[in-house]
Amino acid sequence: MKTMKAFVRTNATTRDVEITDLPVPTIEDDEVLVRVEAFGVGIHDRYYIPKDAEFPYTIGVEGAGRIAELGSQVNDFAVGDRVIFTTVMQSKGGAWAEYAAVKPATLVPMPDQLTFQEGAAIPVPVKTALESMRALDLSEGDSLFIAGASGAIGTLVIQLAAARGIHAAGSASAQNHDYMTSLGADKTVDYHDTDWQQQIREWSGDGVTAALAIQPGTGKECIHVVKNGGKVVTVSGDQLADEQGVTVQQIGHHPDTQQDVIQLTKDIADEKITLVIENDYPFEQGLDALEKTETRHARGKSVVTTPN
């Protein structure tokens, strides 16, 4: 039996993660086996475990690699293809391993210009940024405030907003302000400042058209910088009631967003959009990467490279 190295949760009650040897997943007729070259690091990676998970369970939800094996029903890809993929809540485990069983519907062909590390940084941030823009539903000339704008999602939203003529402001620690401005932010504030909400209101006039709350606990604060009749969209899952004429909603998940993910991946490859990778960790430092990401003090995305 062929085995692989994988980062796993060992049981359902503790959230400890460790490296172990597991059998390489056996694929069904409607799956592909991907040799994982790199995987993305997300704040929820140790928690996204399906109810029917069998332990040890491989964590992780996104990566990039080469197709090593095809199921008999898979016709749109070939062995050796470079692909980007997601493995969200799969019973067979996730992406933090040398191999992953993947449903073809999640596959994105990886342009030749991209490295596997860049590919691994794309799936979750790109899809979330696109779903965020869809929910915000803003037009040219509108204004947007992004709470937690220096991370993987926020850096993409800044650029998507700027490309559509939307005036974007974002909060982050002061050392990230110049970098956010370079991506297209019109206004930056330090969330440590007690008057950052006032700064946003003064910049926007009577308040921004909408706000995107990426970091947990920021939705309530965002309401106070949005003008009457505007909206707050939450990525973090904050549960909030409408307040002061401002509506609050969660981002949605739409199957047709996958086509937009493919297009935005091409735009990244063509350098029309900047993909920000903060750190590329070696495999044995995967837990360090996870713990750093869980602090929520990030500039862009972190990835882990698997052994050759």
Image (cartoon, rainbow, N blue to C red):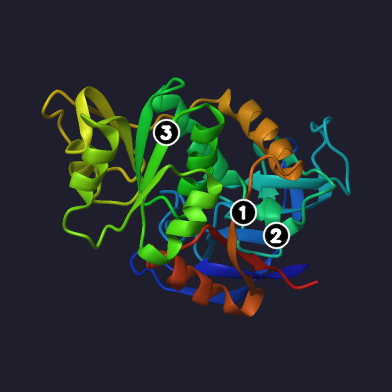
Q: Residue at x 51, y 43 (%)?
A: 184
**Which secondary structure, mark 1?**
loop
Mark in the foreground, 1 or 3: 3
Which residue is situated farthest in the left direction here?
A: 244
**Vertical relation: 71 (above or below) 182:** above
State the image coordinates of residue 224 (x, y, percent, origin top left).
17, 38
State the image coordinates of residue 46 (x, y, percent, origin top left).
44, 62
Q: Residues within 10 Å of mark 2 (few under 14, many from 20)?
A: many
Q: Which labelled disc corresponds to residue 63?
A: none
Q: Residue at x 41, y 50 (%)?
A: 149
Residue type of the residue flagged with mark 2: Gln
Residue type of the residue flagged with mark 3: His
In this orientation, which residue lies closer to the viewer: 35 or 277?
277
In contact (CB < 8 Å): disc 3 and disc 2? no
Visible residue check, residue 267: yes
Q: Give the total number of marks visible in the rendering.
A: 3
Label 3, label 2: how far apart the Cα atoms are: 31 Å
Q: Which labelled disc corresponds to residue 117?
A: 2
State the image coordinates of residue 118 (x, y, percent, origin top left).
69, 55
Q: Is residue 260 left or right of residue 293?
A: right
Residue type of the residue flagged with mark 1: Ala
Q: Residue at x 15, y 32 (%)?
A: 241
Q: Is residue 40 left or right of residue 131?
A: right
Q: Which quadrant holds the C terminus?
A: bottom right
State the image coordinates of residue 197 (x, y, percent, origin top left).
20, 46
Q: Residue tagged by mark 3?
A: 167
In contact (CB < 8 Å): disc 1 and disc 3? no
Q: Residue tagged by mark 1?
A: 121
In this orientation, which residue lies closer to the viewer: 5 or 133?
133
In contact (CB < 8 Å): disc 1 and disc 2? yes
Q: Which quadrant holds the N terminus?
A: bottom right
The numbered mark, 1 or 3, whose residue comes first in the sequence reads 1
